[in-house]
Image (cartoon, grey):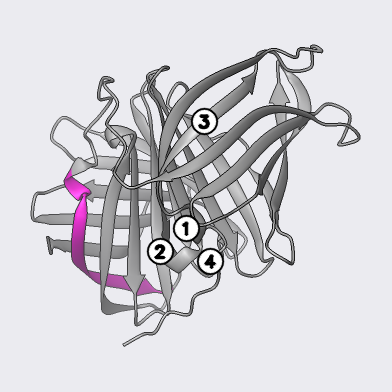
Amino acid sequence: MTTWTKVTGDFDFLNGYFDVHHRTLKQAFAGCDEWLEYDGTTTARTYFDGQISIDEMRFPTKGSYGLSLRLFDPVSEQWSIWWVSSTTMKLYPPVHGGWAADGSRCRLVGEDTHDGRPILCSYEWSDITADTAHWEQAYSADGGETWETNWIMDFTRRSTPPPALDVPKLTDDFDFLVGRWSFHNRRRRPVLGEPFEWYEHDATMEATTYFDGAISFDEGWFPSEGFRGATFRLYDPEAKTWSIHWINSQRGRLESPVIGSFTPDGTGTFEGPDDWNGQPIDVRFLWTPGTDKAAWQQSFSTDQGKTWTTNWHMEHTRVD
């Protein structure tokens, strides 16, 4: 049996339920000193034993959600954080950084745009206790010489789950996957090229949804392979498509997405460009949903989708 080594517990403090008081600057880069105040909640948990942190924010007065996806890179020992708002259902550009040596604060910075102009965006965590935390966002339009804080959050732990939002459900496409599964893997080695062989191993996974189904996330345990894998799926309500990203615990980054949708018969097809050992390829995922049984298949193409080489099958069986 594999014993997983805990890499980091940086964001374990956020696990659980919090009430959140928000203050947002009414207008950035305008010499504005008017702040808007409102209350919300957040629910957070970690995956990969702390290496992934996800929190879902609820804004009842706005009728919307927000989500932070945090990934720790075990090589660089840095965090990357992506923000998703239910009003756009897009991944915002990430910020990158880490914690001070004494653990007192965390600062992350990344490139973004505001009203069409390039800016820097920073996140900063501070004043962490068992039941409270403080967070600020700031923008810089001069390459980091000066910063303007435009969003402040103060967290206070609560003992009960926050109430649900009364907003329309966008999709239930991946609701079938919620829960725990065991699955049998049949994989091609190497994934491309000749000669090759098939090898088999068993694994387990647990899946959940955020934004009432519009974000799907699962964490998989592959004990014989020595790693954990996760999948982050984001629904685009305008295109009615999903972007699906793979995360490997050994790399700690969001891989290039495959994009697609489910057909009326229930089969999901998702494709996207990637590379394998420096060679450009196309990747295809096929999902066959089911209540107690489900199947997934991965294929690669080296000729722009004219032919496909299947290299990974998963057969899922529900555990609970």
Nearest to the observer: residue 45 or residue 290? 45
Q: How many marks?
A: 4
Picture residue at 21% right of the left edge, 49% below the top: 178
- Of the numbered discs 2 and 3, the one sitting upstream in the chain is 3
Residue 277 position in % (x across, y down): 58, 65
On screen, residue 268 above or below 192: above
Query: Where does the N terminus fall, quadrant-wise?
Result: bottom left
The amino acid type, in three-letter code, at marker 1 is Ile
The residue identified by callout 2 is 229
The amino acid type, in three-letter code, at marker 2 is Gly
Q: Residue furthest left?
A: 292
Q: Is residue 127 left or right of residue 303?
A: right
- The answer to whether the residue labelled 2 contacts the one labelled 3, judged by CB atoms less than 8 Å apart, is no
The residue identified by callout 1 is 247
Picture residue at 42% right of the left edge, 39% below the top: 42
Query: Which numbered mark, 2 or 4, is in the foreground of this view?
Result: 4
The amino acid type, in three-letter code, at marker 4 is Gly
- Looking at the rendering, the stretch of residues picked out in magenta corresponds to 176-192
